[in-house]
C-alpha cells in the first residue's frame, strides 16, 4: 500500500468488500464472552494478460484459518476430490461418442458455502467501523479449514436439485438420466 499504486489496491479492496457484503458473508455483532475472533488479512495479486500487461489488481480477504480450534471453530474438513480415473473415463466416452465437452470455473466459489459453525472474525483492516464489534460469519471465507467442504456441500445440493445423482464410485461425478 505504500507504493504509487495504492489507489488501485484500495479500489480492488473496495470491490472485494462489496462482493462480500452482497453475498451476505457476515453480520457485525458484539463479541460474546468466552469467544475469540480470528484475524484476517488482505492478499494482493496483479493479474496479467497473456502479453504481460496488467489485466487487473486483485485483493482478496483471507481469514487466518490456521488459528481455528478443532471442535470449536470447525469439526470436519474433508471434501471429496474427483478421481483421475473418472476424468479420463469421461473424456474417453465423450471422444468415442463424439460429444462436445466444456468446463467452467465458479469465481470465488468458496465464498458461497454456508457455514454450520459459529465463527467470529475481526473486522478487515482498512474497513473497521470504529466499534469493537466483530464479523459473525454466515458464509465461508478463503482460509477457513472447512471452506472446501462448505462449497462441496452447497454445489452437491444444487446439482441434486437439478436432478443429478452422485456416483457411488466417485462422489464428485454427478449423473442425470
Image (cartoon, grey):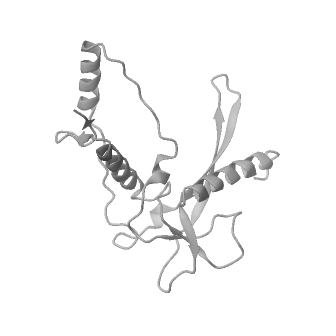
For residue 136, side relative to residue 3 (left or right): left
Q: Give percent across and percent down for residue 105.
A: 47, 36
Image: 103 above or below 166: above
In the picture as drawn, the residue positioned furthest to the left comes out as 168
Q: How many circles with numbers are drawn on the protein?
A: 0
For residue 63, side relative to residue 82 (left or right): right
For residue 111, side relative to residue 13 (left or right): left
Q: Give percent across and percent down for residue 51.
A: 67, 22
Image: 53 above or below 18: above
Q: Nearer the viewer, residue 124 or 138?
A: 138
Q: Quadrant of residue 102?
A: top left
Q: Give percent across and percent down for residue 61.
A: 59, 55
Q: What residue sits 60% from the left and 52% below the top?
A: 19
Q: What residue sits 79% from the left and 49% below the top?
A: 7
Image: 111 above or below 52: below
Q: Quadrant of the C terminus?
A: top left
Q: Give percent across and percent down for residue 116.
A: 38, 66
Q: What residue sits 24% from the left and 13% below the top?
A: 96
Q: Nearer the viewer, residue 73 or 177?
A: 177
Q: Nearer the viewer, residue 44 or 21?
A: 21
In the picture as drawn, the residue positioned furthest to the right comes out as 4
Amino acid at each position: 500500500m505504500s507504493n504509487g499504486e495504492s489507489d488501485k489496491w484500495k479500489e480492488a479492496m473496495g470491490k472485494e468488500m462489496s462482493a462480500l457484503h452482497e453475498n451476505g458473508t457476515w453480520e457485525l455483532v458484539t463479541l460474546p464472552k468466552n469467544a475469540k475472533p480470528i484475524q484476517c488479512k488482505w492478499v494482493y495479486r496483479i493479474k496479467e494478460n497473456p502479453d504481460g500487461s496488467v489485466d487487473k489488481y486483485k485483493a482478496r480477504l483471507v481469514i487466518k484459518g490456521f488459528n481455528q480450534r478443532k471442535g470449536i471453530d470447525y469439526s470436519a474438513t474433508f471434501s471429496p476430490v474427483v478421481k483421475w480415473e473418472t476424468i479420463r473415463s469421461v473424456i474417453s466416452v465423450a471422444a468415442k461418442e463424439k460429444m462436445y465437452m466444456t468446463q467452467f470455473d465458479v469465481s470465488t466459489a468458496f465464498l458461497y458455502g454456508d457455514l454450520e459453525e459459529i465463527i467470529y472474525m475481526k473486522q478487515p483492516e482498512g474497513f473497521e467501523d470504529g466499534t469493537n464489534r466483530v464479523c459473525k460469519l454466515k458464509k465461508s471465507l478463503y482460509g477457513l479449514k472447512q471452506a472446501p467442504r462448505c462449497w462441496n456441500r452447497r454445489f452437491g445440493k444444487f446439482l441434486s436439485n437439478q436432478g443429478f445423482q452422485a456416483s457411488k464410485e466417485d462422489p464428485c461425478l454427478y449423473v442425470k438420466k
